[in-house]
Amino acid sequence: MPSDCKRMGEAPKVQLEGGEPKRRYQVTLLGDARVGKSTIISQFLYDKILTSYTPTIEELHRGEYENEGEMLILDLLDTSGSHQFPAMRELAIRHSDAFLLVYTIDSVASWELLSTLREEIVRLRGSRVPVVVVGNKSDLQHRRAVNRATVQARVELDWNHCYVETCALQPDSVLALFKTVLNEGQVRYKLSPAVERRRKSLPTYTQKHKQEKFFFKRHSCNVS
Ligand SMILES: Nc1nc2c(ncn2[C@@H]2O[C@H](COP(=O)(O)OP(=O)(O)OP(=O)(O)O)[C@@H](O)[C@H]2O)c(=O)[nH]1
Ligand SMILES: [Mg+2]
C-alpha cells in the first residue's frame, strides 16, 4: 500500500430523517463472482464469516458509528459478480463515494476483470474518486495465481489507487481495509469495537439514491 495515498474531499454532510445532520458515505464493492465481497462486508459489519456461498444480486448494508458526537452512516453496497446488471452497476457507480474493486489472488480472470470495472468508474466519475483495489483470500498463498508485485505496480503506479491484500476470514485484515478506504475519502471515523455502533442490513435496495452531487478536492498521490 502506498505510504501516502491521495486525499479526497471530506464526506459530505447530509440531512437525514430526524433533521439531525449526519455524514453519510457509500462504498460500493465490485468484482467477479466468489471473490469474497459479501464475506468482507459480513466480517466487517456483523463479525461473521459466510461459510456457504450464496450469490448476491444487490444488497445495501448500513453501519452507523459515532465519533466525537458526530454520526457516520456507512452504507456498503454489495453487488453481483455472477450476474451482469449494467444499469444497476452504472447507478451504483454514479452514486457512490468510494469503491472497493475486489479480486481473489487465486484467479487471474478475477484480476483481469478489474480493469474493465475501473474503466467504467473512470468514465463515469473521473480518475479522482477514491478506489481501493483488494486482493482477497490472502490466506491462499499456495494457490496464488496473480503476482503481487505486478498487480501492485499496476494499481499504484498506473492507476494511482491504493492496493490492499486481505483475508476476509480475519477481522483485523478487513478492519485495515475499511480504514484505508475511509482514509482515502478523508472520512473521520473510529471503527474500533469500543465505539457504539448499530448495524443493519437492508435486504433489498430500497434506498433512494441521493440527488446531491459530491465534489472531491484534487490531491496528488505520492507513491513510494
Ligand atoms: N479462503 C478464503 N475464502 C474466502 C475468503 N473470502 C471469501 N471466501 C469464501 O469465498 C466464497 C465466496 O465468497 P462471497 O463473499 O460469497 O463472494 P462474492 O464476491 O460475494 O460472490 P457474488 O455474490 O457471487 O458476487 C465463500 O465460500 C467464502 O467463504 C478469504 O479471504 N479466504
Ligand atoms: Mg456476494
Image: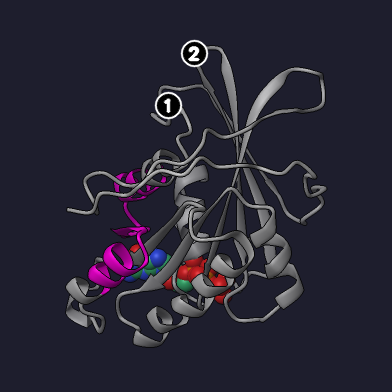
Q: Residues within 10 Å of mark 2 (few under 14, many from 20)?
A: few
Residue shown at 37% from the left, 63% from the top = 134
Q: Residues within 10 Å of mark 1 (few under 14, many from 20)?
A: some
Give the mark count.
Answer: 2
Where is residue 167? Give x, y as percent.
Answer: 31, 60
Residue shown at 23% from the left, 69% from the top = 153
Residue located beneath label 1 in the image: 190
Where is residue 188? Give x, y as percent.
Answer: 46, 27
Is 45 on the left-hand or right-hand side of 108? right
User: Relative to residue 108, is residue 15 depicted above or below?
Assistant: above
Is 224 on the left-hand or right-hand side of 12? left
User: Relative to residue 222, is residue 150 depicted above or below?
Assistant: below
Q: CA distance from mark 1 to mark 2?
A: 9 Å
Q: Is residue 148 visible?
A: yes
For the residue pair 82 and 99, the one nearer the viewer reads as: 99
For the residue pair 149 and 109, the one nearer the viewer reads as: 149
* Residue 161 lies in the magenta-colored region: yes
Where is residue 62? Give x, y as percent.
Answer: 63, 42
Q: Which residues are magenta?
A: 151-178
**Structure colour scheme:** one colour
* Residue 114 lies in the magenta-colored region: no
Residue shown at 57% from the left, 17% from the top = 70
Q: Quadrant of the N terminus?
A: bottom left
Q: Is residue 50 visible?
A: no
Q: Earlier in the sequence, mark 1 or mark 2?
A: 2
Residue shown at 39% from the left, 63% from the top = 133
For the residue pair 88 and 82, the one nearer the viewer reads as: 88
Residue located beneath label 2 in the image: 68
Q: Do the numbered discs 1 and 2 sit on residues whose CB atoms are within 8 Å?
A: yes
Amino acid at dot 2: Glu
Secondary structure, mark 2, is: loop
Amino acid at dot 1: Lys
